[in-house]
Amino acid sequence: MAMVGADDDPLLLPARPPRRKRFVAGSHIGGDYNGLNNGGGSSITTTTLADDDDTDPSSASGLSPSSISNRKGIPVRTKSGRTRDRISRRGKKSTLRFRWMGMHTIIVAAIFIFIITFCYHSIIGNSPNEITHDGTEHPPIDSIERILSELSNANSPFTTEVEQEILLASYDTINQFPISIGVDTDGNNPNWETIVHPATEALRYFNKGDPSIKKRMKPAELAKALSRNQQLRGNVGGGNYNNLHGNENQVVDEGLMRVPKFWDPTPYRIIADERERRQNGNTVEGSILNNATREGDGGDGVRRYLGNYGSRLMTPGEAKSIGSRIPLQNVNNNATNNEEAELLETIFIAVASYRDWQCSRTVESAFQRASHPERIRVAVVDQIHIGIDTPCSVPPNGTCTVNPDQAACKYKSQIDYLTVDAELSVGPVFARHLGNRLYRGEYFAVQSDAHVEYTNGWDTEIIEQWHSAKNEMAVLSTYLSGVEDHIDVTTGNRISNSRPIMCESDFEGFGVNKHLRHGQQPEGTPYIHDMPTLHPFWAAGFSFGRGHFVVNVPYDQHLPWIFQGEEISIGLRGFSYGYDYYTPERAVCFHYYGRKDVPLFWENSNIYRGSGEYGMKRLNAIIHMDAPTPPGQNVDWIRADELKYGIGKVRDLQTFFDVFGIHVKEQRVEHNLCRFVGRPMQKEFIPFLRSNEMGLDYGKISFRYTEEWIRPDE
């Protein structure tokens, strides 16, 4: 588009001509009353300039000389008594009146066109997905159809700019907050899917037809145990729970359960499909529009968009496209003008709870002590004995009628409860896997235990710490310090600045169950200020990072009875996708340790005896830390969904093992790694942070830790 100069600006009025001695009334001869100065001459003429001696007023005006003046210019009376000067003034006024009428018409027309254009783009062009009462999403086909139709030609380039146009056209869809997972009352909700319970799945592969090991359960019992979700928002039990798998007379495979699909918005899937279509040279006619309408694959599209399951590092643009933001609310709890308001990055908190009476208090603390609770969404996987345990959805301080200001009441639209019978619990990995399925596009994602106290202003503080790392791939994660001597639980004020750092790990166990796991971690006041401290490992007790971390590295669905070793699995998988781990400079929540008489999931260990052994085999195999598979051993299940839950290709795992002194074949580690982690590691590694802030470039890091390493200050 060419630049418009001041002389050509269509919004500028024509310059007023210099005033001459006299005006001769003129006629409208142009016929185009647009008021534009078209480069040296106007298309309309309002007056004709003349000198006294060179112009015949009769020829210019068409009026008889007797009605205006004599040749000497002396005014004469007309029949109406008007003089020539009065006629000239009237002509001048008429000219100005016509000029104003023309400009007025232009302004009104411009306003009308602006309003029509605005309404079109607001109502049609940016129409969000329609979310029904059951959470069903309708793809935003109308909002992006115009863009996609242009791509039906194979010669039409599919550029980054076109991808951005698709995402911008779908902005209202992918930026919705909060989004519920909906309910699945009849088993037909397209946002849910059917999977096999992981312990049943493991035993099917290795103990087929052995009733002494495998617990059999009727379909109605499974439906009742797995589907207590009639009212996920604020669910406190009740309802007909047999509707997911039908009644007892229907034939249903044992172990099937309905769960929410992974978050997978239509625009990401469309872009990923079109990339692959162009790359593979498939038939192009209409295919992109057809793909826009097909049902999602439960996380498949967005993960292919974000680096294609770790086959490459995400681009900054891809990473930044993930995450909803909402306008800052004013003191009256109303959203300010969207175009002027500060945007708040939203936060998703996944809480896995096993018969935990403190769960509701944890949820209350997260909302109550946040600077901006309106940006928080909590998803609780509540494993309880129905009718015996108090659900997490029950407010901690009385009913909502008595105390409506409680978080469970005031922010109930921002809380999802997925209730599962405790007898079907197979450890924290599967519960946290279900929690990952509840993520719905928030900007940040938190993993938390169900017995935690948050500090005042925790949301603002942890976000500031994350931004200070200047690393899109940063994940702040560590074990939590105990509540005692660290936080005033009454006020929410932090009373200690110490925090653990993740640097201690070793192999433990015997035979096929030997695995790498974290030990007790050192705690202290940070030496590094104004940014979090790098460390090599990820911790399950607290994790804070961008939402795309949960999307790219979800908990493995196929790991029953794993408690120790899950952190190594997530940590290595995240490393292979390009993520870096830090311990926060200041802790924002603290853990209740040493609780007595609290039920643990181990109480169900006899229900699916033997499945845990196979879970550990799979864990080590997925992260390439297993022994060679014996001949004839069934490996189908061990390698199931390896693309989805396996290792990425952005970084090689051997690089991690070499840098941090881990010898997989010998199953031993170089000890005293904690001497290096902290200031030495920060000084050594931070210079290799990519200039586009997309993680550390381990290809340029030559450091290799050994026990002989000596600190520079020793």
Image (cartoon, rainbow, N blue to C red):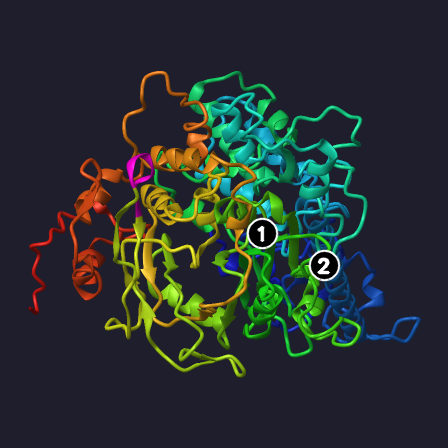
Q: Is residue 160 magenta?
A: no
When asked about the image quadrant of residue 417, the answer is: bottom right
Q: Is residue 157 above or below residue 13?
A: above
Give the position of the C terminus as an image quadrant: bottom left
Q: Quadrant of residue 464?
A: bottom left
Residue type at numbered disc 1: Asn
Name the amino acid type tagged 2.
Answer: Gly
Q: Which residue is mark 2?
A: 234
Q: Nearer the viewer, residue 161 or 395?
A: 395
Inspect the magenta stretch and tell me whether residue 512 lies in it. Answer: yes
Q: Quadrant of residue 99?
A: bottom right
Does 422 sit above or below residue 206? below
Q: Is residue 557 above or below residue 254?
A: below
| Residue 656 image point, x, y percent | 23, 44
Q: Magenta residues, as a range?
A: 510-516
Q: Is residue 309 above or below residue 152?
A: below
Specify few, some or many for label 2: CA neighbours under 10 Å numbering under 14, 14-19, or 20 or more: many
Taking the view exactly as shown, the residue that stands out farthest to the right is: 79
Residue 38 marker = 1
Identify the residue at horizontal 38%, vertical 60% (top origin): 476
User: What is the secondary structure assignment of the residue under circle 1?
Assistant: loop
| Sequence-wise first label, 2 or 1 | 1
